[in-house]
Image: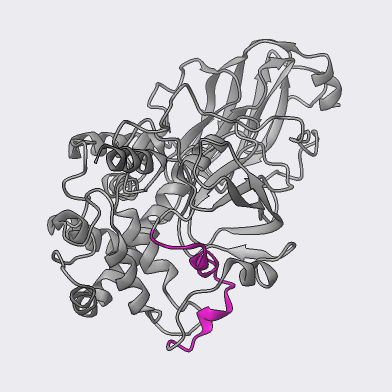
């Protein structure tokens, strides 16, 4: 029935206004866009998150820019016959919600039900430790190139906007902001070089590979002789690999805890941020590996399924991409990330950052109209021009294909590996008691975005966030030609 409606659709934007009919528990309510509850919202392929204090979230999504359109609340769908509707919401305080649309259509019954998405848990112990890291100036990254970035007061305000339900809103916002700087390398290296199948707390580390990765960073200010770069690893500037190894031996236990705490805060923050419509971003793309001094032989160790995670610790965590693809990353396999994965909704952005591999992710085969496991974090980024979506550590994917493709002549590495994955999800949060369309239309005919906007560099000029990209290569090439 839904497809029948859409087949006669006319291009037009749809707006909606939320009307609270009953909030029996008296819960505080916020929208993550910072606007008043009764503001007019909507538009093409939009999704807005309603935050219900001490209860959960409702993602209100308009997937189509057509009429008759639909509005989706946590995968509970109503058809909207006009371009402006009221959403009449009841929040009984038991983890559910009820709503109706006015004006309405007779296709569905007047009142629909749904289930709130849960609020994330944030550990007071983690927050206390993270506060100490800020007091010691390990967070945020010191001397960010092209400062000032965002100051503390701005990060506090953004925390109150996105995480008003938590007394730790500032720490959650700071954890995300810090991820978008060169601090991300700490959070990546200390995760991927853990032997995660050895039952120990904490996991044993491949310390030689961590030290080598820190030492081999050799561009811009991200070099072992730079004070800010080494401070992000709780170290002093180093002049030799042995110096890095010696310092790592002294700080690795604390550094590993630091990484674990911040990754947990990131996961909580990601879970709380607004979702994105799968019709706005039908695919997501990542240029890998994000740490340029790591070859593709380190991609496989980013997965919990890598057999090397079981040790022995005398065996380095390194596996060729070919070997990984023939075994635990082969087509049909399920893989789970050890670390945060960053993506964009544009293939051009992935090309801009790729180091030999582009990862493409498709939404899961369920009824969700949004990317439930993905967060758009640009609003908290050090670079407001950078298009960035994140998957938290522990996210699973099904491998769909691996092939080699040629990319545009003016990009780096003309022939690159393409790994296509499907986000793994056990199912949607649809309430089975509702009588409504059981699945969204297929995404096959929606073209992937090539560009997220009219930006040439995909980020602010000279602001890389510690990720080497095409701009850095071009600048170094030009510098070499001038000599």
Q: What number of labels is visible?
A: 0
Q: Nearer the viewer, residue 65 or 469?
A: 469
Residue 346 can be seen in this image: no
**In the image, 9: left or right of 371?**
right
Name the one closer to the observer, 226 or 261.
226
Above or below residue 82? Residue 437 is below
Above-or-below relation of 231 to 199: above
Point out residue 425 in the picture as x, y percentages from the top left corner.
66, 54
User: x%, y% of residue 1?
Assistant: 86, 26
The colour scheme used here is one colour
Q: What segment is highlighted magenta in the picture?
A: 293-313
326 magenta-colored: no
Residue 208 drawn above or below residue 58: below
Residue drawn at the location 84% of the way across and 18% of the way down: 7
> In this rendering, does residue 149 appear at all?
yes
Rendering quarter of residue 117: top right
> Which quarter of the picture shows residue 60?
top right
189 displayed left or right of 94: left
Residue at image position (46%, 17%) is 39
Residue 480 image offset from top left, x and y in percent: 29, 43
Q: Nearer the viewer, residue 233 or 463?
A: 463
Seen at 50% across and 65% down, the residue is 302
Across and down, in percent, residue 236 comes to 13, 66
Q: Quadrant of the C terminus?
A: top left
Closer to the camera in the image, 20 or 261: 261
Residue that appears at 41% across and 67% down: 191
> Measured along the vertical axis of the image, is residue 166 above or below residue 282?
below
Q: Is residue 295 magenta?
A: yes
């Amino acid at each position: 029935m839904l497809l029948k409606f859409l087949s006669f659709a006319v291009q037009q934007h749809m707006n909606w206004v939320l009307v609270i009919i009953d909030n029996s528990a008296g819960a505080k309510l916020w929208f993550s866009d910072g606007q008043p509850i009764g503001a007019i919202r909507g538009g093409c392929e939009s999704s807005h998150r309603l935050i219900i204090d001490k209860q959960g979230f409702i993602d209100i999504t308009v997937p189509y820019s057509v009429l008759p359109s639909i509005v989706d609340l946590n995968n509970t769908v109503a058809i909207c016959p006009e371009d402006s509707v009221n959403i009449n919401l009841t929040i009984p305080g038991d983890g559910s919600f009820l709503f109706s649309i006015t004006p309405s259509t007779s296709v569905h019954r007047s009142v629909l039900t749904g289930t709130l998405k849960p609020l994330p848990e944030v550990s007071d112990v983690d927050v206390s430790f993270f506060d100490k890291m800020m007091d010691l100036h390990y967070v945020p990254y010191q001397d960010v190139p092209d400062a000032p970035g965002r100051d503390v007061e701005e990060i506090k305000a953004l925390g109150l906007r996105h995480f008003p339900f938590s007394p730790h809103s500032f720490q959650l916002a700071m954890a995300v902001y810090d991820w978008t700087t060169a601090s991300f390398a700490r959070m990546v290296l200390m995760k991927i070089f853990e032997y995660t199948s050895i039952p120990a707390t904490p996991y044993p580390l491949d310390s030689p590979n961590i030290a080598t990765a820190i030492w081999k960073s050799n561009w811009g200010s991200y070099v072992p002789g730079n004070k800010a770069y080494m401070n992000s690893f709780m170290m002093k500037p180093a002049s030799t690999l042995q110096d890095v190894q010696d310092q790592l031996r002294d700080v690795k236990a604390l550094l590993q805890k630091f990484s674990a705490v911040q990754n947990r805060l990131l996961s909580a923050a990601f879970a709380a941020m607004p979702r994105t419509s799968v019709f706005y971003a039908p695919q997501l793309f990542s240029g890998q590996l994000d740490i340029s001094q790591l070859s593709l032989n380190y991609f496989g160790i980013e997965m919990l399924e890598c057999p090397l995670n079981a040790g022995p610790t005398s065996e380095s965590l390194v596996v060729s991409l070919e070997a990984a693809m023939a075994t635990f990353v082969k087509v049909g396999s399920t893989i789970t990330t050890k670390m945060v994965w960053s993506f964009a909704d544009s293939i051009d952005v992935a090309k801009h950052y790729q180091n030999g591999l582009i990862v493409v992710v498709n939404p899961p085969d369920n009824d969700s109209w949004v990317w439930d496991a993905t967060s758009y974090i640009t609003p908290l980024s050090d670079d407001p021009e950078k298009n960035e979506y994140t998957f938290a550590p522990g996210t699973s994917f099904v491998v769909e294909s691996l092939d080699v493709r040629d990319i545009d002549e003016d990009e780096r590495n003309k022939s690159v590996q393409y790994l296509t994955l499907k986000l793994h999800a056990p199912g949607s949060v649809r309430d089975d008691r509702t009588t409504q369309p059981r699945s969204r239309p297929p995404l096959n005919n929606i073209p992937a975005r090539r560009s997220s906007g009219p930006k040439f560099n995909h980020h602010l000029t000279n602001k890389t966030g510690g990720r080497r990209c095409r701009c850095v290569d071009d600048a170094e090439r030009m510098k070499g030609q001038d000599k």
